[in-house]
Amino acid sequence: MYAVIATGGKQYKVSEGDIIRVEKLPVEAGQTFTFDQVLAIGGDSFKAGEDVKGATVEAEVLRNGRERKIIVYKYKPKTGYHKKRGHRQCYTAVRISKING
């Protein structure tokens, strides 16, 4: 059984036991989080739209962290213009524990 959930402006296809990294959630490590924005549920039969209106996906929060640094370098030739910036995106790692639907 799998589900398609939406969080942080992205969509994820998840199954029970999967570990995924999503945009940072306001939850501490060790707690549970419920994703209520379920777009579809599949497996033996496929359900989407109004059929998954009350469906939820429960997940256990493993850790909050930051990704590796990405270097953003802007450069325009012949003008002496250049900028070097770094960025580290925050994430929350979760383990999918149950799909209710």
Image (tube, helix red, strand yellow):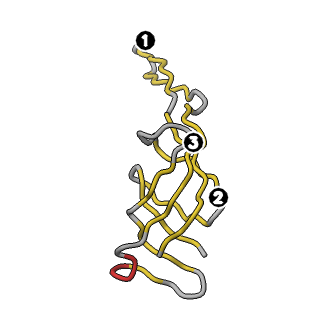
- Which residue does the image show at 56% across and 50% down from the upper left? 60
The spot of residue 66 in percent (x, y) is 55, 31
Of 27 and 72, which appears nearest the observer?
A: 27
Q: Is residue 64 left or right of residue 48?
A: right
Crowd class of label 1 (few under 14; some 14 to 19; many from 20; radius 10 Å): few
Vertical side of 37 occupied by 100: above or below: below
Of 50 and 81, which appears nearest the observer?
A: 50
Vertical side of 36 occupied by 73: above or below: above
Q: Which residue is denoted by mark 2 in the rendering? A: 18
The spot of residue 11 in percent (x, y) is 46, 60
Vertical side of 73 occupied by 1: above or below: below
* Amino acid type for the residue under numbered disc 2: Asp
The spot of residue 78 in percent (x, y) is 44, 16
- Camera-nearest label, 1 or 2: 2
Displayed quadrant of residue 40: bottom left
Vertical side of 48 occupied by 15: above or below: above
The answer to which of marks 1 and 2 sits earlier in the sequence is: 2
Of 16 and 13, which appears nearest the observer?
A: 16
The answer to which of marks 3 and 1 sits earlier in the sequence is: 3
* Amino acid type for the residue under numbered disc 1: Gly
Of 53 and 42, which appears nearest the observer?
A: 53
Q: Which mark is residue 30?
A: 3
Q: Which residue is denoted by mark 1 in the rendering? A: 80
Q: Distance between the residues labelled 3 and 1?
A: 50 Å
Q: Do the residues labelled 2 and 3 touch (CB within 8 Å)?
A: no
- Which residue does the image show at 41% across and 15% down from the upper left? 81
Which secondary structure, mark 3?
loop
